[in-house]
Amino acid sequence: MTTQKTYSIGELAREFQITTRTIRFYEDQGLLHPQRRGQTRIYLPSDRVALKLILRGKRLGLSLAESRELIQLYIPAGDNRHQLQALLGKIAEKRAMLEQQLKDIQAMQQEMDEAEQRAREAMMQLENNNV
Amino acid sequence: MTTQKTYSIGELAREFQITTRTIRFYEDQGLLHPQRRGQTRIYLPSDRVALKLILRGKRLGLSLAESRELIQLYIPAGDNRHQLQALLGKIAEKRAMLEQQLKDIQAMQQEMDEAEQRAREAMMQLENNNV
DNA sequence: CAGCATCTTTACGTTTACGTAAACTTCCCC
DNA sequence: GGGGAAGTTTACGTAAACGTAAAGATGCTG
């Protein structure tokens, strides 16, 4: 039997640089489901993974509701054809969103290149004027 | 002399699938600076570009404040060394953010691959049970 | 056993990004 | 010239995602 590692709310907060309030809020929103030892919350590695997913989602601009959906794509989920079809639909949706974001990022990166170019050229101009 | 094309608020709203309220709000927040003909707002192509940037930013999870900063990277901006250095700093910041997002997207894409795999395999199982 | 850290619940406050509604001009059309 | 259609300002409302504060339980620690 493999005993799982556990985490306290404070440990997770420290590790991910967020407040305990935030972690409890995520639970409130149905994104985390810690165990309890009396009153105290006990987090399993699976909760830690979910937390990682949430924070990654945030960096990409996902709402908590969207991250909740995402997390549910990991739980084996549906057992009948209908649910599995729905699941594949969701996955396709997320994929499309990611594709769009990829394009957006590439566009922005290019614009950063150009902006840097312009800035460097302006610097060069200043150098020349000072000779 | 090249006369610029202009847009009404309604035109832009329709084109970008947002409300006029949203467009006025962006102006309020200092992201757009339309001309006026009497009371009526007149938008130039530059405003349209800014709007595109804002919406792209939103898709990547930027706040309006961050998009405002981004837009300012396009305006030739600083004329002295200090400002240009600051500009280059901002650009580097944005670049780092984009790099992180790229990684996040790639991770998510892979997880979507795996989720799809699992879903398809579950489907196959159902098929077999029904033979 | 007093004290400090860490945990808990409850609850009101705050920021961001608009939505929604009211009340009013302006312009065009029949 | 009486309606729309599209524009305007002003203002209150709202959802999301926490922040912040109060008040209390729990547990170790010198």
Image: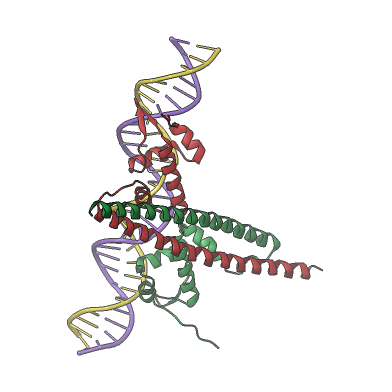
Chain colours: A green, B red, C yellow, D purple
Q: Nearer the viewer, residue D4 or D29?
A: D4
**Which quadrant of the figure has residue A89?**
bottom right
Count of numbered circles on the image = 0
Q: Residue at x 58, y 69 (%)?
A: A75
Percent position of residue C17, x then y: 40, 47
Res. A29 in view: no
Q: Position of residue B18 (x, y in %)?
A: 47, 40
Percent across and percent down for residue D30 are: 20, 90
Which residue appears at 43% of the width and 47% of the height? B53
Tell me the quarter of the image containing the N terminus of chain B. Answer: top left
Quarter of the view holding residue D8: top left
Question: Which quadrant: the C terminus of chain B?
Answer: bottom right
Where in the figure is residue B29, as x and y percent of width and height?
Answer: 33, 43
Instruction: Describe residue C1's horizontal placement relative to residue B88 as left or right.
Output: left
Does residue A17 sit above or below B7 in this rendering? below
Q: Is residue A74 above or below residue A61?
A: below
Residue at coordinates 34% horizontally, 68% vertically from top-left?
A: A19
> In percent of the image, x 42 and y 56: which residue is there?
A113
| Residue A80 visible, this angle | yes
Most foreground residue, A65 or B12: B12
Farthest right residue in view: B131
Q: Quadrant of residue A12?
A: bottom left
Residue most toward the front? Answer: A131
